[in-house]
Image (cartoon, rainbow, N blue to C red):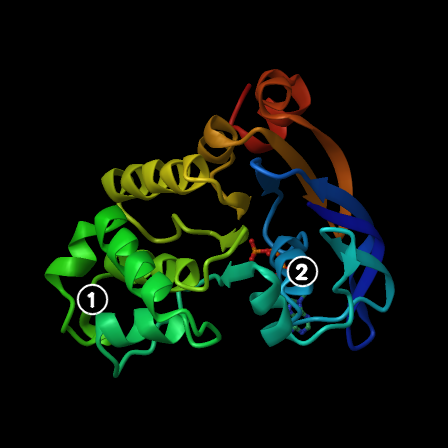
Amino acid sequence: MLKIEDINVYYGNIQALKGVTMEINEGEIVTLIGANGAGKSTLLKTISGLLKPKQGKVLFEEGSIGGKAAQSIVKMGISHVPEGRRVFANMTVAENLELGAYLRKDKEGIKKDMEKVYELFPRLLERIKQQAGTLSGGEQQMLAMGRALMAKPRLLLLDEPSMGLAPLLVKQIFNIIQEISEAGTTILLVEQNANLALSIADRAYVVETGRIVLSGNADELTSSEEIKMAYLGGH
Ligand code: ATP
């Protein structure tokens, strides 16, 4: 579904991604594991068109999206939930969700998807008219995910959905990620909590200072001594 071939991405003179190659197959949950500053968010931003690779290819369903504008990439079926869940603070929950569908014209479809989002996140339905800025951190995460789903993505990019949330809420958010996956959306997940990410993922890539240093099935990586020591708090 998504193929990245040998991309280099820079911030000015600083190279953040160095020859990254990876792929995501339809229906998978793929996770990126790596320390702070490894380049995980940069990779998501490159896929969603917020950053342009200086070299290499980004292919989505065989077509190149490497130089395209972020808006056309959303239209093609990729939605990005950035780190820090940026919701529109002065708008209500419902208005935020409507904005997620701003590139769509199928009114009936939009209405149905809005109902699906409220089924997935009943908490948002209870707070439909509340200003998004007054929601709790967990509720804002739900809203950011719901808004991304309103674009009807085939590929959903999630950047650190568990950040700053209480353990019970993290569990809830991860259950919902699994439900989204089971309903047919392919997922690329960036997560500090490698144990948790590997527990729901099919495959994973390990990123270190801008390079992919290891990849494999989630099960294999979970039992790898190297991964246990470096990322899973093992001994
Ligand atoms: P984290 O888990 O801390 O978010 P990450 O793996 O997502 O880390 P990135 O945010 O992709 O890492 O950052 C990769 C590298 O690029 C880091 O060295 C970071 O300092 C640098 N970087 C990120 N954004 C910018 C920017 N806007 N300008 C310059 N350098 C940047």
Left/right placement of residue 113 relative to residue 234 reads left
Binning the other alpha carbons within 10 Å of mark 2 as few (below 14), some (14 to 19) or many (20 upward) gives many
Q: Position of residue 159 (x, y in %)?
A: 50, 54
The correct choice, above or below, for 198 with respect to 166 in the image is above
* Residue 134 in picture, x, y percent from top left: 19, 72
In the figure, is residue 41 to the left or right of 117? right
Locate ligand 1 by image quadrant. bottom right
Q: Which mark is residue 184?
A: none
| Residue assigned mark 2 | 47
The amino acid pointed to by label 2 is Ile
On the image, the x and y values in percent for residue 63 come to 78, 58
Q: Quadrant of residue 15?
A: bottom right
| Residue 51 shown left or right of residue 218 in the figure | right
Q: Nearer the viewer, residue 21 or 225?
A: 21
Q: Are marks 2 and 1 in contact (CB under 8 Å)?
A: no
Read off the residue under disc 1.
135
> Helix or strand or loop: what does disc 2 sit on?
helix
